[in-house]
Image (cartoon, coloured by chain):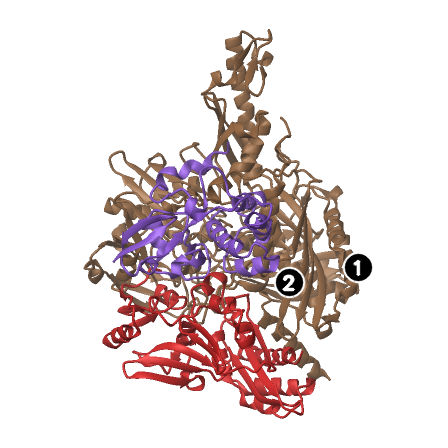
Amino acid sequence: MATRFEVNGKAVEVAVEPRLTLADCLRHVLRLTGTHVGCEHGVCGACTVLLDGEAVRACLLLAVQAEGRSITTIEGLSSDEDLTPLQKSFRKHHALQCGFCTPGMITTAHALLSEEPDCDADRVREVLSGNLCRCTGYISIVEAVLDARSAYRKDGAGEPKQSRSRERDRVGAHGASRDDGREPR
Amino acid sequence: MKLPAFDYACPTTLAEAVTLLAAHEDAKVLAGGQSLVPMLAFRVTAPSLLVDLGRLSGLKDIRIGDDGVRLGALVRWRDILDNAGLARAHPLLVAAVHHVAHYQIRNRGTVGGSIAHADPAAEMPGIVTACDAEIAVTGKAGTRVIPAAEFFVSALTTALAPDEIITEIHFPAWPAARRFGFEEFALRRGDFAIAAAAVFYDHNAAGRAINAHVGVIGVGDRPARIAAAEAVLNGAKVDADTIARAAAATSAAVTPQDDIHASAAYRRSLVGTMVERALLAATT
Amino acid sequence: MKNTFIGAPIERREDLRFVRGRGQYVDDLAPAGLLHAVILRSSVAHGRLHGVDASAALQIPGVRGVIAAKDMGERPPIIPMRLQPLPDFKPYEQPVIAADKVRYVGEPVAVVLADSAAIGEDALEAISVDIEPLPPVTDLAGAAAGASLLFEPTGTNIALKFRAERGDAAAAFKDAPYRRRERFKVQRHYGLTMEPRGLLAEWDAAVGILRVFGAAKVPFFNRRILAGQIGLPETAIDMVENDVGGGFGARGEFYPEDFLIPFAARHIGRPVKWIEDRRENLMTMNHAREAEVDVEIACTRDGKILGLRGNAYTDMGAYMRTNGAVGSRNIAQFMSGPYRIENIDIDTTLFMTNKTPVGTYRGPGRFETDFFRERLLDLVAKDLRLDPIEFRRRNLVADAEMPYRLATITPFESKDELDSGDYAATLDRCLAEIGWNEKRKLQGRLIDGRYHGLALGCFIEGGAAGPKETAKVALNDDATFTVSMGSSAVGQGVETVFAQIAADALEVPLDRIREVLHGSTAYLTEGYGAYHSRSVVMGGSALLDAVEKFRAALRAEAGKRLGCTAEGVKIGDDKVKGVDGRALPLKDFAGIAAEGFFLNKKHTWTYGAHAAHVTVDAKTGRVEILDYVAVEDVGRIINPLTLKGQVIGSLVQGLGGAFLEHLVYDEHGQLLTGSLMDYLLPTASDFPNLRSFATDQKPSPINPLGAKGAGEGGMIAAGGVMANAVANALADFGVEPRELPLSPPRVWEMINAARQTKQAAE
């Protein structure tokens, strides 16, 4: 089925079988491999993307259901120039080890902080309880999200929040640019 | 765990959706997909056609009126939590939805989907049962209203005909002075309940409980009201002794099964504790 | 060598790609012409395999081939054991695909190659498999009875017995004034990784090279096995380590698919990718931990432990996998833990059952024995009316006794000794951090409907397995360095910690370490990998050796160019100076490289103590942790940030094992917990109150870094501490947990049983 939607600010059209999940469509058709698939039955949260700004599990959504909608993936919440305040906070607090759950953690936390920049630790824990991490034990992830709140407060002193629409389009360019993040310098 | 092949239709009118369902014997309705898609992934169901309700208009409204609360079938969990009016119009519903699944699921999962799925440990079937809600459905033969007590047949089985679609759930009006409590025990936050209790009652002029409703989930093949516990409450002063008797009556009335997560004996005891705690919450 | 970066909380360089979703895991690869492999697995736990008919599946459009045992010559290859490869285990090793028998649900029976994984899964339903069911063996009793045998020619379901001996246990028990004998049990659970396993194999027929992506943990060892099985020289196989989404002992061992996927790629002449799905992961990745013990302790009345003896019984599942014996062996050896127990006689009997084969999971044998031993110690302390802390303190191995010999394991004669440690110091620190003296007043008290309990436990954590590790340092033409390591990354941050070590050894700024390459077989001629908390100690020590050799080579070359002896050359961070003061830029020496290695036969022993304060809701059985303190001494700390990550991460895994995680089988050998809705992992809201403290009082004397392996200690003490805390909270009821997990239903049932016992007595 021909399906049209927007990914990270760019219009895309894909021809997919109805049975293809949005997660597999993003990863294997659009080659946006930052969205990870950890369970394919809606428990682990690694595939979390934003659907019209709301966090959803991409493994429980058919690609054809995305028709006319706007999807944001981890690639859309990232830039080449610098890490976002949320990403910096994850790094600062050592809120990741193997990195597999991380994109889902960040998309989920981004959705949460965009809507509730004043959420408390218990709310962060409640929201993140839908995202499994096997490496960190979660404590550092909760700290990282709490520490990033200031960046999402509109009146606060934090850094301005990343706007989805201004993000650089990365559709299709992922394979070629995968090493961008490797440079320690 | 790739989904089996199926056709997909995304009708824009209810009539069209019903026609599609009627024409395909093994078609399934896709609402939020939060239960159906995992079942497809495990290939425990393999419909030939999915009828996506996502583009139907008119099923997404929350209407609060003198006759109670009407939830369109496609109202999502987050819509309930975001609706400021519901906190007063139906606080028990809101309390229960706070236990439903996780953040991402609440952005997709729908009340109609949950009721149609009929998991015996899910909150929404429990709440509609506890509250004597009515479920409006539309099929080829027209529209009918099914009382919650007749809707749930057994685990994952309902009174819905294959061509019927849930359109609305109607909760009777909720008096402001009503006492209520919702208690749930799950192994982890957001998991299906091992057991949960939804209770409410009103007070008569003498300060005694009337119109008591005790609903439970997780302890049978469908949600249930516990008449024996309600009988303990009706006409009684809701004190520690009454609460203990209502809890005991609940434990005595249910017939849970052993499963990998909990024994029947545990669930039986636990559901009494849930009723006890929900009633304690109601009195305070 | 400087000490600028070692010991500092350096933010990880890996994170720059991971937080942007730019990691590259094996499923992110998609070469042209790719086919997808889907594996048909036995749905029967035990049976004779009479045939596989794939003719209908081959008619499905998009199905390109189906491979079964008959396609692999006379007999399919067998997967040899990597650790403890004793001759006794040979009959129990796993073939890469079922040929004549199936022995667990999930065993590979056929491989479908298709244009997509979805089509491959469609094809599974079209393959008919003829299996004649045999009675399944699903528990230790069934295995011991031997009425049904997994491997008929051996005549038994017992693969082996390990024995741990020290001193004269029989004599110690004969005259002991006090003895206590107990049975304990730990449930089957496993090192689930968030990224399921996956492999991509490409056979480049033109040059005769087989490339296998998705390698992890021990790529060099796995290459050796694969080369032998597939009939290629090792040099014709490239194992490529991509980003790896977690290891925990389970990922990266040689599994059946590690042969099947490369074989399929060569067989069909196209790249083949297999990505394990979560259901497969739950039923095929190495399970772990399932063990029972019947153990007896002898003490003096004032609490000196005289001896420990007994039997352990481990459920190995259907085959002896590559590291399947490690947990059983360790259960025998580590029953004594950090305590001075002079007389030991422990047998571990390994039983074969029709369940998924077992392997290691972080802290193998140590998590189990800490639960067994620390429970036993608390029971003894109660009997003897001793303070459980003082009882422990009195028996901890003292600093002055180091090195301290552990019980010797037979067969596979294996001697070991604790290297260094002040065990009482971490115990005291732990008591101080949790505020034991104040909090102990709450012991057993009922407050607001919750019973309070506190407990403390001690542990040791082995690390730094030999025999060897390798490293290479090369100077680039921009005066940066490339470091290559024989160790592997499984998410623990090796790029960062090796960069820290390299920068300090080379005495250059951190950003001059341009890259740290690891894992893949292309960088070095040999490597050993990531297990037994060995990467920092073994790899780091090899790296020091490589740097030393690099600097010697640089001095020699600079001496030539500067006209002085090598000894006269001074190496600055971007210049090299001769004796006459002349200097050359470092970058002029680009191309100089040196390889180093580190050999080791001994182990490092991190040690520590955990204490916790819990409440128990007696009506629901829910245990809540109000405070948990983990203290451990890890020798020299390389990166406190990543160290803390290891401790808290492994602690939460340990708490998962203590409370949640359980692989449940029915009597037919069917796995009942085949989804993440039923196999319960800890989530962000389960264990919020955890604190960890690392000390560096006792550097290891057995390696130049002074470091000790520290990836596993966090989880080792968790089960014992939690069980003792629950026992103490529920002392009024007389509840004594003897089995994990302490799920709410089990805790409630213990309370209920204790109540009924009490009522019957009254």
* Disc nearer the start of the sequence (2/1): 2
The residue tagged 1 is C438
Which hue belongs to chain B?
red
Kind of residue at disc 2:
Val
Q: Which mark is residue C295?
A: 2
Residue name at image x 58 percent, y 53 percent: A142
Total marks shown come to 2
Residue C486, can we see it? yes
Query: How much space separates mark 2 and mark 1, taking CA atoms?
Result: 34 Å
Q: Is residue B152 left or right of residue C566?
A: left
**In the rendered image, the vertical position of residue C617 relative to residue A120, given as above or below:** below
Which chain is assigned purple? Answer: A
Q: Identify the subunit bearing mark 1.
A: C
Q: Are marks 2 and 1 in contact (CB under 8 Å)?
A: no
Residue C437, quarter of picture? bottom right
The brown one among the chains is C
Secondary structure beneath label 2: strand
